[in-house]
Amino acid sequence: MLSAGLPQGSVPKLERPGPLRERVYEALLELITVRQLRPGQHLVESELAGHLGVSRQPVREALQRLNTEGWVDLRPAQGAFVHEPTEAEADQLLSVRTLLEAEAARLAAANSGSAGIAALEALCAKGEQSVADDDVDLTVATNAAFHAKVMELAGNVVLAELAAQVDRRVRWYYTPVARQRGKQSWIEHRALIAAISARDERAATEVMRSHTEQTRTTYHHRGDTQV
């Protein structure tokens, strides 16, 4: 195991076409989001460059950008480390997420048609199967896709833009509790679909608020029941 924490072959080398600086940034951000690079982990430029098949320069630039955005901490004389979020940071972001997503659920109930509801049903079935298969990565990705679909059905561009700003960190916080939330999370998604299908704005709002608050609570107690 390298100090960067990535076994050989776990990360595909980047293709050369396209803006390399941006591709390196996106690759590292995704590795942090899915916790292949874990909070507190030391990030060695040369090792990351080797894994991605690039020189150290775009890696250095990506780490500086990630530092600016709060994903990486640059420590004098020590190097770069994946940021370790505090409980307060997580609580603030997940609280904002609750406000945004509750409003999205209300608007989705007001605006959704049969095609949108069918799309939610399909995503829910996919998520339930991922839980049954104990595929955490797919569960996290499908959970994000489900919530993104609700946001799309809300039909509010400004709300969607605000949600996009917190989406990546929501995935970051959700990954370590995805298995704990497990089947219950998708039961809550089913209840949300029912409220949206019934065009019950109040119920959709309350279901989504309760759902996102449960995730927030689970995150704060993740060490108590972690499997």
Image: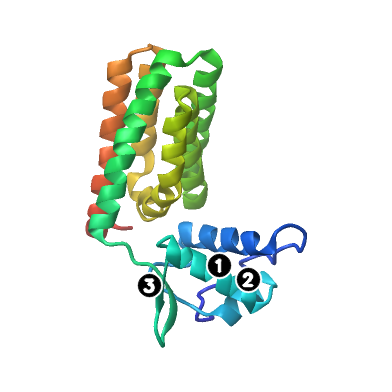
Q: Secondary structure at mark 2?
A: helix
Quarter of the image holding residue 19? Answer: bottom right
Residue found at x 38% / y 67%: 83
Point out which mark residue 62 bears. Answer: 1
Q: Is residue 105 above or below residue 48?
A: above
Q: Are marks 1 and 2 in contact (CB under 8 Å)?
A: yes
The reply to whether residue 96 is visible in this rendering is: yes
Q: Decide if residue 104 is on the left or right side of residue 123.
A: left
Image quadrant containing the C terminus: bottom left
Point out which mark residue 40 bears. Answer: 3
Kind of residue at badge 2: Pro
Tell me if mark 2 has few (under 14), some (14-19) or many (20+) residues whose alpha carbon lies within 10 angstroms of its own.
some
Q: Nearer the viewer, residue 96 or 14?
A: 96
Kind of residue at badge 3: Gly
Given the current orientation, which residue lies at the most extreme right position? Answer: 17
The reply to whether residue 128 is visible in this rendering is: no
Q: Is residue 113 above or below residue 160?
A: above
Of pointers 1 and 3, the one earlier in the residue sequence: 3
Quarter of the image holding residue 22? Answer: bottom right
Residue 46 % position (x, y): 60, 81
Of pointers 3 and 2, the one earlier in the residue sequence: 3
The residue pinned by badge 2 equals 58
Count numbered badges in the picture: 3
Tell me if mark 3 has few (under 14), some (14-19) or many (20+) residues whose alpha carbon lies within 10 angstroms of its own.
some
Q: How is the image coloured?
A: rainbow
Q: Secondary structure at mark 1?
A: helix
Q: CA distance from mark 1 to mark 2?
A: 6 Å
Residue found at x 39% / y 30%: 189
Kind of residue at badge 1: Ala
Tell me if mark 1 has few (under 14), some (14-19) or many (20+) residues whose alpha carbon lies within 10 angstroms of its own.
many
Residue found at x 48% / y 62%: 32
Q: CA distance from mark 1 to mark 3?
A: 17 Å
